[in-house]
């Protein structure tokens, strides 16, 4: 009898200990502690941020057509590039990336070329690669993205500067305003040659507002419209999704499906007041323009605005809150299990998570942007309750 009782207690303790271990694994909370803010009147519109091996911060400024370089403690170092068409000059910087060896790769979609700088040597580039045309197709190098997180069309699948993933889009013409358009992701080598003929990813392009005006037409980003999002992890696995569908698909460079992550949350209806507030971000749009659109207007907010892959392969999804002025980040592991949620009260879009820091682009009510760095702090929910 005593033996049975001790056995029962022992079994209970094993079960309880196992439960505690599982709870600690599945009930964690990630806090973001603000660590650094970079804002300067010299920085125009930020559409990307990158971090090198020293923790130096590269800020892509699409208005001033240059890259601002800051130290890891937020001290300004220099500007890289300027407006122009010669070596080290750019017409429109659509993407920047840092390789494993800290080379800087710059994508100019207007000049159809990639420029590469050696680590720490930014006065003149070491290589320029002309982007290839897509034969018998009207596609041109392009970008994807959204008005808060900026846009990009460049990725480095092996992170060595010898292979690139470039987005190509189809432009609009008067005769096909309502035609479906796609963003297509192609593999390109260091000589500017297509590695494979077909795109690795073909996804519907950014949803646009198309309005006829006199004999012409106007194309604008659709307020609350669907946006394609593409990310890469450190192993070159491609993750892609559309913001009106909470489903993220992972494939390899050959298009083979590796995983799919989905999650169910309630959709948020767009009320009239929200429409009016959002139109303030579009100086050239009026309510009557929206009503005359050839495209159907969204009835619901997109589920999320962006997602990124952290250096530990967790997926951070910027889920929209009801006011459309804040996010709640849903953090999943690479198997699709939700491990934490993190509210961010302002429209700060996290773009990079590396070495226990998160780097984001914040846009205030006046449209002024800054770079915010957060320190990641992981806590157990069970510990907090105690």
Image: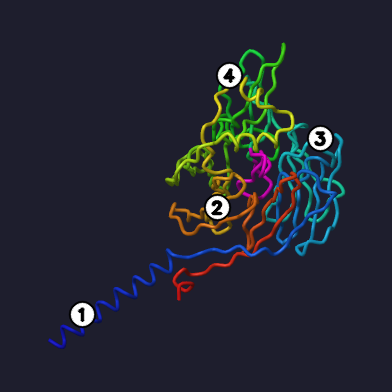
Front tag of 1 and 2 = 2
Disc number for residue 91: 3
Q: Assign a secondary structure to mark 3.
A: loop
User: Hey, which residue is sitting farthest left in the picture?
Assistant: 1
What residue is at 70 percent from the left and 16 percent from the top? 213
Q: Earlier in the sequence, mark 1 or mark 4?
A: 1
Counting from the top left corner in percent of width and height, residue 82 is at 86, 42
Q: Earlier in the sequence, mark 3 or mark 4?
A: 3
Q: Mark 2 near mark 4, Cβ–Cβ under 8 Å?
A: no
Q: Mark 1 near mark 4, Cβ–Cβ under 8 Å?
A: no
Mark yes or no: residue 259 visible: no
* Local crowd size for mark 4, using a 10 Å CA cut-off: few (<14), some (14–19), many (≥20): few
Counting from the top left corner in percent of width and height, residue 197 is at 58, 29
Q: Earlier in the sequence, mark 1 or mark 2?
A: 1
Query: How is the model colour-coded?
Result: rainbow
What residue is at 84 percent from the left and 58 percent from the top? 76
What residue is at 72 percent from the left and 44 percent from the top? 47
Q: Assign a secondary structure to mark 4.
A: loop
Image: magenta residue range: 145-164
Mark yes or no: residue 69 visible: yes
Q: Which residue, given by chain and number where applicable, does mark 1 sit on? A: 8
User: Hey, which residue is sitting farthest front in the picture?
Assistant: 273
Q: Earlier in the sequence, mark 2 or mark 4?
A: 4
Is 180 located above or below residue 206 in the figure? Answer: above
Disc number for residue 328: 2
* Local crowd size for mark 2, using a 10 Å CA cut-off: few (<14), some (14–19), many (≥20): some
Front tag of 3 and 4 = 4
* Local crowd size for mark 3, using a 10 Å CA cut-off: few (<14), some (14–19), many (≥20): some
Left or right of 226? Residue 13 is: left
Is 141 located above or below residue 177 in the figure? Answer: below
């Amino acid at each position: 009898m005593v033996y049975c009782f001790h056995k029962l207690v022992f079994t209970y303790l094993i079960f309880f200990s196992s439960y505690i271990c599982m709870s600690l694994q599945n009930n964690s909370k990630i806090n973001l502690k603000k660590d650094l803010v970079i804002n300067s009147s010299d920085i125009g519109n930020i559409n990307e941020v990158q971090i090198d091996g020293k923790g130096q911060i590269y800020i892509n400024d699409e208005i001033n057509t240059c890259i601002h370089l800051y130290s890891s403690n937020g001290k300004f170092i220099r500007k890289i590039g300027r407006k122009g068409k010669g070596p080290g000059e750019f017409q429109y910087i659509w993407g920047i990336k840092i390789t494993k060896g800290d080379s800087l790769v710059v994508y100019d979609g207007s000049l159809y070329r990639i420029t590469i700088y050696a680590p720490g040597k930014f006065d003149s580039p070491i290589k320029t690669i002309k982007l290839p045309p897509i034969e018998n197709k009207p596609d041109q190098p392009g970008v994807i993205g959204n008005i808060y997180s900026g846009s990009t069309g460049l990725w480095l699948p092996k992170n060595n500067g010898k292979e690139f993933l470039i987005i190509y889009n189809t432009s609009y013409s008067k005769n096909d305003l309502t035609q479906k358009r796609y963003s297509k992701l192609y593999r390109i080598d260091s000589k500017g040659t297509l590695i494979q003929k077909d795109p690795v990813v073909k996804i519907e392009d950014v949803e646009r507002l198309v309005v006829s005006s006199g004999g012409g037409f106007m194309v604008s980003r659709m307020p609350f419209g669907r946006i394609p999002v593409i990310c890469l992890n450190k192993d070159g696995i491609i993750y892609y999704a559309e913001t009106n569908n909470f489903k993220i698909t992972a494939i390899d460079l050959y298009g083979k499906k590796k995983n799919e992550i989905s999650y169910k949350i309630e959709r948020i209806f767009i009320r009239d007041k929200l429409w009016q507030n959002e139109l303030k971000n579009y100086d050239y749009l009026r309510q009557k323009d929206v009503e005359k659109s050839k495209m159907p207007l969204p009835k619901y907010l997109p589920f999320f605005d962006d997602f990124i892959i952290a250096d530990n392969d967790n997926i951070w999804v910027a889920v929209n809150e009801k006011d459309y002025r804040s996010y709640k980040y849903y953090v999943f592991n690479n198997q699709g299990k939700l491990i934490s949620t993190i509210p961010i009260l302002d429209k700060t879009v996290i773009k990079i998570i590396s070495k226990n820091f998160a780097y984001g682009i914040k846009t205030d009510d006046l449209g002024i942007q800054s770079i915010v760095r957060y320190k990641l702090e992981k806590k157990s929910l069970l510990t907090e309750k105690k």
